Image (cartoon, rainbow, N blue to C red):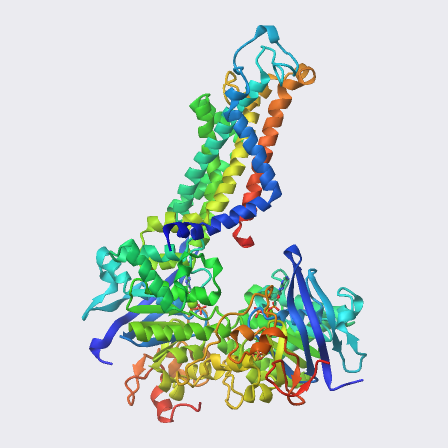
C-alpha cells in the first residue's frame, strides 16, 4: 500500500466526523456566522477606509447611510470600522483566554487524572476555591494586583478558564486510565509521558475542543460585560464591550441606536455562531453516538 | 377452557423503527407453544431477539416498537383466552395479567430493583396491586416466600435495601417478586447470566423446585446450552429473529437437525472432554440486522448451504409432531401454509 | 516436568488492596485479593486459573505482568536458564523483561485505543523493544495479523470497524508483537458470543503450538479452562485450593470446592446424569476472609480442625502432581476421589 493510499484510509475517522458535521445544519449555520464575522474583522482594512480611532469633527453622530454604513459616533468615528477593529480585539481576547485556559487545564488535568494522589487533591481544592469565589470579585482583586490592560484581562480569563477543561480532562483520564488499552501500554513498558500524551489525551480532545469553543464565546461575552462596567479593557482601545460602554447613557440608547445595536448584534451573532458550532461538534464527537 | 398449551405464539413480528426510518426486524415470524406446567428453553446468541420476544409477550416494549403481525394467545387456567397482541399496552386488562398471571424476571438483578425502597415494600407492591389484602398480610406472604427461597432470617432482611444484598440474593428477591402472585407463566430472561456458577446452580435448582411446587409454566431465556439441557422440557433455538429449531429436549440435543443447532453444540467445550475433541468453530459473525441475507439468515455461515438457501427463506418443516425445523434440507410436513 | 523447565515460579505472592475511610484516608482494612499464592509455570504449558468472581484471578495475572506490585513474595523468572526475581530487577532489565511476559485482557472493546489504527497500536511497542526499520515493522504487523486470520490490510483500520471476536484476535496479535514467552490471558472469551468463542480458543491453541508459547489462562468457565489447559489451579478467596493436571482434576477432584464447582457447571448433554452439589450461601468477603480453611463456611465436610487451622497446598502422597489444600485430602483420595 503506497504512502498516499495509507493517508486516505487513515483519515477515515476524521473524514467520517467531518461528513457528520456537514449534516448538522445548526453547526454549519454556526460555522458560517462565526466565519463571516471573523473574516470581516480580519479584513477590516479592505472593508473600510476609516480607522477606528480617527476623529472627524465634521461628521459627529451621523445616522447610518452613505459613506458610513453604521453611522458615526459622537466624536465622528466610523462605527462600522470600530465594530470591525473592535471585533479583532474582542475575539483575540476571547480566543487567547480560552486557548491559554485550555492548555493549562489539559496539562494539569492530564497529570492529576493519570497519577492521582496528593497532587491531584491539591489541584481539585484549588479549582474548587477559584470556582466558588465570585467572579467579579476575583476580577477586581486581580485588576488591583495586575492593573489594567488587555494582557491582564487575558491572564484573568486563563486563570478562571482552566477549571472547566481541567475537570473535564481529569474526569476522562480517571476513567480512561482504567481501560485495558492503557494497561496494555504499561505492560509493554511504554513511558508514562507517552501514555499520557500520545495514547490517552487524543481520546479527550473532542470534549476539550468543544469546551474551547464554549469558553471563547463565554469570554467574549465577559469581556463585553466587564468593559461595559469599566472593569475590562482600557476605554481608549475599541472592543465590542467598550463600544457599547461608550453608548450607555440613556439618551444615547434611544437617540443613537446605531452606536450600540451593531456591536451588540456582532457579539450576539458571533457568540451564537460559536455556540451552535460547539454544540454540533459535541454531537459529532460524542463517543456514545458512534 | 384449558388446552394443553398455556401460550401459543403465532408468526409474531416485532420491529423497531430507528433513525432515518430504518426498520430493525428484531423478531421476525416467531412461532412456538409453551406446554402447561413445562419449562421451555429459548436459546440463541446475543442480539437474536430473545429479550424482545419476552418483552413482546409482556407488552413491555419501548414506544419505537411495533407488532405488525402475529398473535400471542394466552390460555390461563380457569379464565378466558386472550390475544396479548390485541390488548392496549397500558390498558387495564394487560395490567391485570402482567405481574399477576404472567410475570417476568429480568436479566440484570442489579438494575431491576429500586435502590431507595426496601425489599419488602418492593415485593408487596406487586401483591397489593393485584389482590385485596392488607399490607400486613402481604408482608407475611412476602416473608414466607423469601423463606421458601431460602433467604436466611427473612423476616428481618425484608426491611433491608437492595445494596445490602449480594447478586445471588437480589436474584432471589426478583424471583420472589415474580412468584408472589402465583403466576401461571414465568418468563425468566437470563436469570443467571450475571452470576457465578455456584450461585447460578443455586438459582437453577430454586426455579426447578418452585416450579414443581407451584406447577407454573416457564420460559427460560439463555445463551447457555448447558442450562437448557439441565432445565428445559422443550427447546426453541433462535437465530436472527426466527426460531430455527423447536422440539423437545430429546429432539434438539439427541437429534439436532438445523445446521446452526448442530454447529452450536459442536462449538462449545463440554466439561470432561478435556481437549479430546477439538472444537469446531462457526465461521464468520452474525449478519447485521439491517442488512440481512435474502435467503436463510444462517446461509453465509452454514457448511451445508446450497443455492436454494441463498434465495428463499426456508419455511417451517415438521419433521415429527414435536420437532420443527427451518432448513431447506429437512424433509417433513410443510407447516407454513 | 523438570526443574529446568520451570519458566516462572511464584513464591508466597500477596497482594492486598487497602480499604480507606474518613477524610484523611486512614487505612481501615485490606482486601486480600491474592493471599499467599505459590505456583510454578512450566515452559510450553497452559496453566488454567479458575474461580468465581472476585477470587483474585485478574489480580494475580496483573502481578505476573507487573501491572500491579505484590505486597510481598517473589517471582522467579527463567532468563535463559538463570532464575531471577522479577521484582528486584533494575529499570533497564525490568524494561527488557516486559517483552517476555504479555497479557490479553478480558474486554476486547476497551483493549484497543479507539483513536488509533491497528498499525499505530502495534507500532510503538515493536519500535521500543526492537530496532526494526519502519518497513520491517510493517511487515511484522502484517504477518501477525495473518497469524490470527485477519487480512493484513486491516492494519489501517480503526477498532470500531471490528467485531468483538476480531478485536480479541487483534489483541492476541498485539500481545505477540514483542515476541513474548509467557502470555497471561485474562478471560479472553468471556465477553464473546458463544458461537465466536471457539474461533478464538482454537486460534490461541494453534499459536501456542506454532510459537511455543506458555499461557496462563484465566477464566471462570470451567469447561473453557479444561479445554485449554494442561494443568488447572482452582482459586477461592485469594488462594489456590487445588492444582492438578486437567484430566486428574476432572476425574478425581478432591477438594470439596472443586467438587461443587465441577458439579455446578451446566453441561449441554442431556444424557449425563449428574448429581449437583449446591453450595450454601455466598462467597465471604475477601476483606474479611474466614479463619482456618477459607472454604469452611460453605463446606459440607467441615470439621473442628478446618475452623482453626489453614490447610496448606500440598501434593498427594500418591500423586506428586496433584496439589490439594484440604485437611481431608488424603482420606478423600483414598476413598477414590468423589463420584463424578
Ligand atoms: N429499543 C430498541 N430499538 C432498536 N433496536 C432494538 C431495541 N431493542 C432491541 N433492539 C434490537 O433487537 C435485536 C434483538 O435484541 P434482544 O435484546 O432481543 O437480543 P437478545 O437475544 O435478548 O440478546 P442478549 O443475549 O444480548 O440479551 C437486536 O439487534 C437489538 O439491536
Ligand atoms: N484496584 C483495586 N482496588 C481495590 N480492590 C480491588 C482492586 N482490584 C481488585 N480488587 C478487589 O480484589 C478482589 C479480587 O479481584 P480480581 O479482579 O482479581 O478478581 P477476579 O478473580 O479477576 O474476578 P472476576 O472474575 O470478576 O474478574 C476483589 O474483591 C476486588 O474487589
Ligand atoms: S437453510 Fe440452508 S443455509 Fe440455512 S441452515 Fe439450512 S442448510 Fe444452512
Ligand atoms: Mg436479552
Ligand atoms: Mg477478572
**Left or right: where A17 falls relative to C13:** right
Q: Residue furthest bottom?
A: C335
Viewer can see residue B189: no
A241 or C237, nearer to the observer: A241
Quadrant containing the C terminus of chain C in the rendered view: bottom left
Rendering coords of residue A148 (x, y %): 46, 21
Task: Write down which quadrant ligand 1 falls in.
Answer: bottom right
Q: Is residue C240 above or below residue C256?
A: above
Rendering coords of residue C181 (x, y %): 28, 69
Q: Number of callouts in the render?
A: 0
Rendering coords of residue C190 (x, y %): 46, 70
B95 or C184, nearer to the observer: C184
Q: Residue at x 56, y 48 (%)?
A: A20
Q: Residue furthest front?
A: B307
The image quarter in which residue B112 lies: bottom right
Q: Residue at x 66, y 81 (%)?
A: B316
Viewer can see residue A38: yes
Quadrant containing the N terminus of chain C in the rendered view: bottom left
**Left or right: where B20 falls relative to C188:** right
Rendering coords of residue A236 (x, y %): 51, 16
Q: Is residue C168 above or below residue A149?
A: below
The image quarter in which residue B127 lies: bottom right
Q: Residue furthest left?
A: C82
C153 or A290, nearer to the observer: C153
Amino acid at each position: 500500500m503506497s504512502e498516499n493510499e495509507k493517508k486516505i484510509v487513515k483519515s477515515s475517522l476524521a473524514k467520517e466526523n467531518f461528513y457528520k458535521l456537514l449534516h448538522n445544519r445548526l453547526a454549519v449555520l454556526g460555522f458560517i456566522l462565526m466565519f463571516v464575522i471573523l473574516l470581516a474583522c480580519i479584513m477590516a482594512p479592505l472593508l473600510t477606509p476609516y480607522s477606528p480611532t480617527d476623529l472627524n469633527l465634521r461628521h459627529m453622530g451621523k445616522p447610518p447611510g452613505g459613506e458610513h454604513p453604521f453611522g458615526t459616533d459622537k466624536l465622528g468615528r466610523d462605527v462600522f470600522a470600530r465594530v470591525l477593529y473592535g471585533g479583532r480585539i474582542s475575539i483575540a481576547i476571547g480566543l487567547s483566554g480560552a486557548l491559554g485556559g485550555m492548555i493549562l487545564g489539559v496539562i494539569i488535568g492530564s497529570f492529576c487524572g493519570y497519577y492521582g494522589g496528593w497532587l491531584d487533591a491539591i489541584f481539585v481544592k484549588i479549582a474548587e476555591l477559584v470556582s466558588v469565589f465570585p467572579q467579579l470579585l476575583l476580577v477586581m482583586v486581580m485588576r488591583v494586583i495586575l492593573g489594567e490592560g488587555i494582557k491582564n484581562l487575558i491572564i484573568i480569563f486563563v486563570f478562571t478558564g482552566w477549571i472547566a477543561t481541567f475537570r473535564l480532562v481529569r474526569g476522562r483520564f480517571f476513567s480512561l486510565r482504567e481501560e485495558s488499552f492503557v494497561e496494555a501500554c504499561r505492560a509493554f513498558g511504554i513511558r508514562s509521558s507517552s501514555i499520557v500524551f500520545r495514547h490517552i489525551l487524543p481520546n479527550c480532545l473532542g470534549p476539550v475542543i468543544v469546551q474551547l469553543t464554549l469558553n471563547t464565546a463565554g469570554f467574549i461575552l465577559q469581556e463585553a460585560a466587564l468593559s461595559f462596567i469599566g472593569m475590562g479593557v482600557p476605554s481608549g482601545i475599541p472592543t465590542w464591550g467598550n463600544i457599547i460602554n461608550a453608548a450607555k447613557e440613556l439618551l444615547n440608547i434611544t437617540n443613537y441606536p446605531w452606536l450600540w445595536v451593531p456591536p451588540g448584534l456582532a457579539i450576539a451573532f458571533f457568540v451564537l455562531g460559536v455556540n451552535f458550532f460547539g454544540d454540533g461538534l459535541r454531537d459529532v464527537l460524542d463517543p456514545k453516538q458512534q | 377452557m384449558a388446552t394443553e398449551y398455556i401460550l401459543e405464539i403465532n408468526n409474531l413480528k416485532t420491529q423497531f423503527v430507528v433513525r432515518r426510518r430504518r426498520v430493525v426486524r428484531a423478531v421476525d415470524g416467531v412461532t412456538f407453544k409453551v406446554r402447561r406446567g413445562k419449562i421451555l428453553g429459548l436459546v440463541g446468541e446475543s442480539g437474536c431477539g430473545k429479550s424482545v420476544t419476552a418483552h413482546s409477550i409482556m407488552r413491555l416494549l419501548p414506544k419505537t416498537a411495533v407488532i405488525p403481525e402475529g398473535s400471542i394467545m394466552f390460555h390461563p387456567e380457569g379464565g378466558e383466552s386472550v390475544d396479548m397482541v390485541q390488548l392496549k399496552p397500558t390498558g387495564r386488562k394487560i395490567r391485570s395479567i402482567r405481574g399477576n398471571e404472567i410475570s417476568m424476571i429480568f436479566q440484570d438483578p442489579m438494575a431491576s430493583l429500586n435502590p431507595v425502597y426496601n425489599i419488602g415494600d418492593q415485593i408487596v407492591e406487586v401483591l397489593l396491586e393485584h389482590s385485596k389484602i392488607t399490607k400486613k398480610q402481604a408482608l407475611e406472604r412476602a416473608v414466607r416466600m423469601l423463606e421458601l427461597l431460602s433467604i436466611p432470617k427473612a423476616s428481618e432482611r425484608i426491611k433491608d435495601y437492595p445494596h445490602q444484598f449480594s447478586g445471588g440474593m437480589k436474584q432471589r428477591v426478583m424471583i420472589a417478586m415474580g412468584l408472589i402472585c402465583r403466576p401461571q407463566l414465568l418468563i425468566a430472561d437470563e436469570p443467571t447470566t450475571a452470576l457465578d456458577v455456584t450461585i447460578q446452580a443455586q438459582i437453577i435448582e430454586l426455579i426447578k423446585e418452585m416450579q414443581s411446587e407451584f406447577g407454573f409454566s416457564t420460559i427460560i431465556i439463555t445463551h447457555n446450552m448447558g442450562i437448557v439441557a439441565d432445565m428445559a422440557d422443550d427447546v426453541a433455538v433462535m437465530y436472527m429473529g426466527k426460531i430455527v429449531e423447536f422440539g423437545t429436549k430429546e429432539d434438539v440435543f439427541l437429534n439436532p437437525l438445523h445446521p446452526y443447532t448442530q454447529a452450536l453444540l459442536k462449538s462449545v467445550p463440554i466439561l470432561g472432554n478435556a481437549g479430546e475433541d477439538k472444537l469446531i468453530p462457526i465461521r464468520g459473525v452474525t449478519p447485521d440486522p439491517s442488512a440481512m441475507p435474502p435467503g436463510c439468515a444462517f446461509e453465509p455461515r452454514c457448511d451445508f448451504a446450497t443455492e436454494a438457501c441463498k434465495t428463499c427463506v426456508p419455511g417451517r418443516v415438521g419433521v415429527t409432531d414435536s420437532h420443527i425445523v427451518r432448513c431447506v434440507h429437512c424433509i417433513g410436513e410443510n407447516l407454513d401454509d | 516436568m523438570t526443574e529446568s523447565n520451570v519458566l516462572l515460579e511464584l513464591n508466597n505472592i500477596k497482594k492486598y488492596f487497602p480499604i480507606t475511610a474518613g477524610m484523611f484516608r486512614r487505612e481501615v482494612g485490606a482486601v486480600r485479593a491474592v493471599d499467599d499464592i505459590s505456583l510454578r509455570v512450566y515452559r510450553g504449558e497452559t496453566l488454567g486459573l479458575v474461580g468465581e468472581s472476585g477470587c483474585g484471578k485478574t489480580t494475580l495475572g496483573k502481578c505476573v505482568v507487573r501491572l500491579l506490585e505484590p505486597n510481598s513474595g517473589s517471582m522467579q523468572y527463567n532468563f535463559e536458564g538463570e532464575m531471577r526475581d522479577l521484582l528486584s530487577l533494575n529499570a533497564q532489565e525490568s524494561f527488557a523483561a516486559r517483552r517476555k511476559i504479555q497479557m490479553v485482557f478480558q474486554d476486547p472493546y476497551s483493549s484497543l485505543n479507539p483513536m488509533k489504527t491497528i498499525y499505530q497500536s502495534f507500532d510503538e511497542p515493536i519500535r521500543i523493544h526492537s530496532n526494526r526499520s519502519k518497513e520491517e515493522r510493517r511487515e511484522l504487523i502484517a504477518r501477525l495479523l495473518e497469524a490470527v486470520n485477519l487480512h493484513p490490510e486491516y492494519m489501517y483500520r480503526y477498532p470500531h470497524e471490528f467485531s468483538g471476536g476480531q478485536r480479541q484476535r487483534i489483541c492476541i496479535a498485539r500481545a505477540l508483537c514483542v515476541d513474548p514467552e509467557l502470555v497471561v490471558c485474562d478471560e479472553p472469551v468471556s465477553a464473546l458470543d458463544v458461537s465466536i468463542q471457539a474461533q478464538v480458543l482454537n486460534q490461541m491453541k494453534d499459536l501456542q503450538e506454532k510459537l511455543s508459547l506458555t499461557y496462563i489462562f484465566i477464566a471462570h468457565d470451567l469447561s473453557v479452562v479444561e479445554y485449554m489447559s494442561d494443568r488447572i489451579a482452582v482459586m477461592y478467596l485469594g488462594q489456590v485450593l487445588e492444582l492438578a493436571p486437567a484430566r486428574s482434576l476432572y476425574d478425581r477432584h478432591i477438594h470439596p470446592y472443586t467438587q461443587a464447582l465441577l458439579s455446578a457447571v451446566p453441561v449441554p448433554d442431556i444424557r449425563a446424569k449428574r448429581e449437583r452439589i449446591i453450595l450454601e450461601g455466598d462467597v465471604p468477603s475477601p476483606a474479611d476472609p474466614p479463619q482456618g480453611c477459607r472454604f469452611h463456611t460453605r463446606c459440607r465436610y467441615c470439621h473442628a480442625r478446618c475452623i482453626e487451622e489453614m490447610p496448606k497446598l500440598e501434593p498427594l502422597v500418591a500423586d506428586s502432581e496433584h496439589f490439594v489444600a484440604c485437611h481431608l485430602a488424603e482420606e478423600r483420595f483414598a476413598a477414590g476421589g468423589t463420584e463424578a
